Image (cartoon, rainbow, N blue to C red):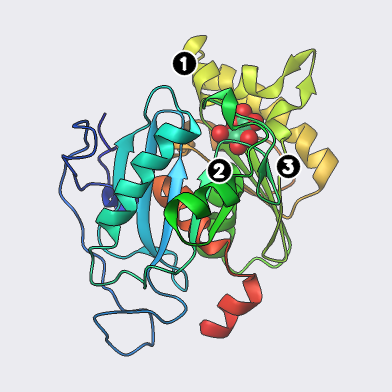
Amino acid sequence: MHATKGGGNEARFEESIDHLQNRVLTKKVREVPTTRRGASSSSNTTALGAGYVGLDIGGTGIKGGLVDVSSGELLGSGLQVPTPVPATPGSIINTIAEMIRHLESSPSAPPPSTPIGVALPAIVQRGLVRSAANIDPSWIGLDVERFMSERLDRPVKAINDADAAGLAEARYGAGRGNSGTVLVITLGTGIGSALIVGQELVPNLELGHLEIDGFKAESRASAVAREREDLSWPDYSERLQRYLAHLEFLVSPDLIIVGGGISARSEDFVPRLNLRTPVVPARLRNTAGTVGAAAQMFPAGTLTALL
Ligand code: BGC
């Protein structure tokens, strides 16, 4: 499996670590400066804002990086490895332990006792996993924060993957500076959703599972549904219009951000939408989950104080 090539943030998951199960992603790395804005240069940045480990566990790949939580940028290169099969807690913990070891060999790495943030394609309520999308069902019922903390020997904070991506978009991406109600919808294999109000997340909103016209929204309007049914952009936009118009009625957001890989093609569908709420594509692209996994450990106020 290969990381997506592309500009901006997409270029940042590009390092390979061959020893990770011999299945790797390759590519060149765009190095990001290791100092945060306004901070003086230091080779071992342990201050708030620098070098927190974020991991984004997906059905096919696991991404990870050291995140500067004041800027929302990755410090150095991110990692991406295939998700082990079966994607059980036991196999995933071994993979992420290896990724963390690799990330912590960087001079920007925080001390080993620093908490890490992990995003999962699951409902995560106060550390407990309550669902499992594209990962093994054995995650359900697991106290994932406790399990990972014990196995990794440091505090772990877990979050739903769409919540992580949404939080990152709201704070550092297309929603930056918006103090209102921001709704982030990620279109991928399924549909993820995140609601951010005044830059704080309202966790575990599962709006992809909303039933519309007798169908679960994510079975009709996800990026995968478009590919599966070979929908033209106008036809797909119609589906999205129906879905987003319903969400707009339910939530009355000030801004809707559309994320997921498909947001790179936003010009093919966003202009066809007709909503009273502004709809914009996500900006962080494939770093959003990793960045949000780390950023969730800091309430919005603590970050503002840093800027
Ligand atoms: C799951 C969500 C997840 C989303 C994106 C949905 O099927 O229910 O929890 O955030 O997929 O992975």
Q: Secondary structure at mark 3?
A: loop
Query: Which three-letter amino acid code belongs to the residue tagged 2?
Result: Asp
On the image, numbered disc 2 is attached to which residue? 161
| In the image: residue 19, left or right of residue 191 | left
Q: Is residue 265 left or right of residue 9?
A: right
As helix, strand or loop, the secondary structure at mark 1 comes to helix
Residue extending farthest bottom = 40
Q: Which residue is mark 1?
A: 227
Q: Tell me the crowding category of disc 3: few under 14, some 14 to 19, or many 20 or more residues within 10 angstroms, Cα based.
A: some
* Image-quadrant location for residue 249: top right
Residue drawn at point x = 42 percent, y = 82 percent: 47
Q: Is residue 35 left or right of residue 196?
A: left
The answer to whether marks 1 and 3 mark residues whose Cβ atoms lie closer than 8 Å is: no
The spot of residue 194 in percent (x, y) is 66, 47
Task: Count up the numbered dots.
Answer: 3
Where in the figure is residue 45, as x and y percent of width and height? 33, 79
* Residue at point 56%, 51% (across, down): 164
What amino acid does circle 3 point to? Leu
Position of residue 181 relative to residue 110, above or below, is above
Give the Cα separation between the discs numbered 3 and 2. Answer: 11 Å
Q: What is the number of the mark on residue 127?
A: none
Q: Secondary structure at mark 2?
A: helix
Give the number of the disc on residue 205.
3
Is residue 265 shown to the viewer in this render? no
Of callouts 3 and 2, which one flags the residue occurring earlier in the amino acid sequence? 2
- Is residue 70 among what the camera can see? yes
